[in-house]
Image (tube, rainbow, N blue to C red):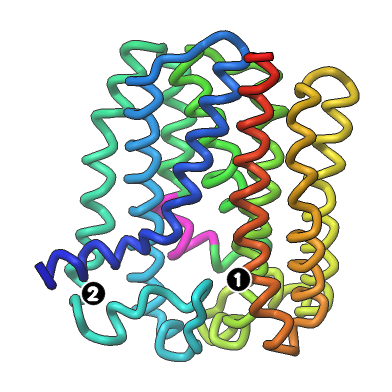
Amino acid sequence: MKGLKVWFLETRPQFLTLSVVLAFLGTAAAWYDGSFNLWQALLAGIGLVLTHASVNILNDYFDFRSGVDLATKRTPFSGGSGILPARLLTPRQVFWLGLACLPLAAPIGVYFIVVKGWELLPLLLVAAFFILLYSPFILKRPWPEWAAGAGLGALPILGLYFAQAGEYTYHAVVAAIPSAFLVHNLLLLNEFPDAEADIKANRKTLPIALGKKGAAVFFSVVALAVYAWIIGWAAAGVMPLWTLLALLTLPLTLRAINGAVHHDEPARLMPGMASNVMSVLATQLLMGIGYILARAI
């Protein structure tokens, strides 16, 4: 049992909550547009969780191989699972665990391609590109956070929407953009404590490329853009007014911005990172609830 627990913890299950919330939001947007199937929503959600687990595991593997895990101080939000530095699993075991999640998810993707349409295939191929190349390649290119925002923010919303509706719509794209911004910033703020170690691994994250002060400004702009996007499209009638419930997370976001601005003060950065995680999850959850209420009322 202890061995199974270690394998489970290697997936970093506390972060997989994000996939559940993304699946909920994508399904809620589709339901608002008149498409919903509980079985297909659950199946697509399982596929998303499996691919997210693969990202987490492979990132852990490449962080250990590059030496980043050994040079960083772990926090509840950054620094990896700690499984490999503690030698609870071997790098080979972690690598194959990460890869094994993909063939488990693949039949789900094939099912939806057959049932809903081949238009899903390009999205799945792009997602596979992000999963396999993010840690070894994209992280070593300037501004890698955009890939996390796209691959683990926007694409899941579009994928869950397609799994219900069998098509991509303009409305689905509008609904997906806030998730791209939020996941981008989830990664960005968590990179601040790792910047010095990431430099040694030749990574080019924004805290390195722009400096932490510049990255804090970038983080703040993107964080506030989430609310501007929702307000603007709700005012235009594309997003339902009920999605404005997401504005309730603004105090959490402001606390996250405060942590980014005072990145050199752990007493402010750590609470800011915690607030950022809560804001990312709660903003998308409230958006999803907004879509449901708009359809139900």
Image quadrant holding the C terminus, namely top right
Relative to 1, 233 lies left or right: right
Packing grade of label 2 (10 A; few <14, some 14-19, many >=20) is some
**Which corner quadrant of the image does residue 266 belong to?**
bottom right
Q: Relative to 63, is 9 above or below?
A: above
Q: Mark 1 points at which residue?
A: 190
Q: Can residue 280 be seen in this view?
A: yes
Magenta-highlighted residues? 131-138
Looking at numbered disc 1 in the image, what kind of residue is underneath it? Asn
Residue 161: image x %, image y %? Answer: 53, 23
How many numbered badges does the structure rendering display? 2
Q: Front-most of 3 and 106? A: 3
Image quadrant holding the N terminus, namely bottom left
Label 1 near label 2: C-beta < 8 Å? no
Examine the structure image and report whether residue 137 is included in the region drawn in magenta.
Answer: yes
Q: Mark 2 points at which residue?
A: 91
Looking at numbered disc 2 in the image, what kind of residue is underneath it? Pro
**In percent of the image, x 78 and y 55: which residue is there?**
223
Q: What element carries label 2?
A: helix
Relative to 277, 104 lies left or right: left
Relative to 87, 243 lies left or right: right
Residue 273: image x %, image y %? Answer: 64, 71
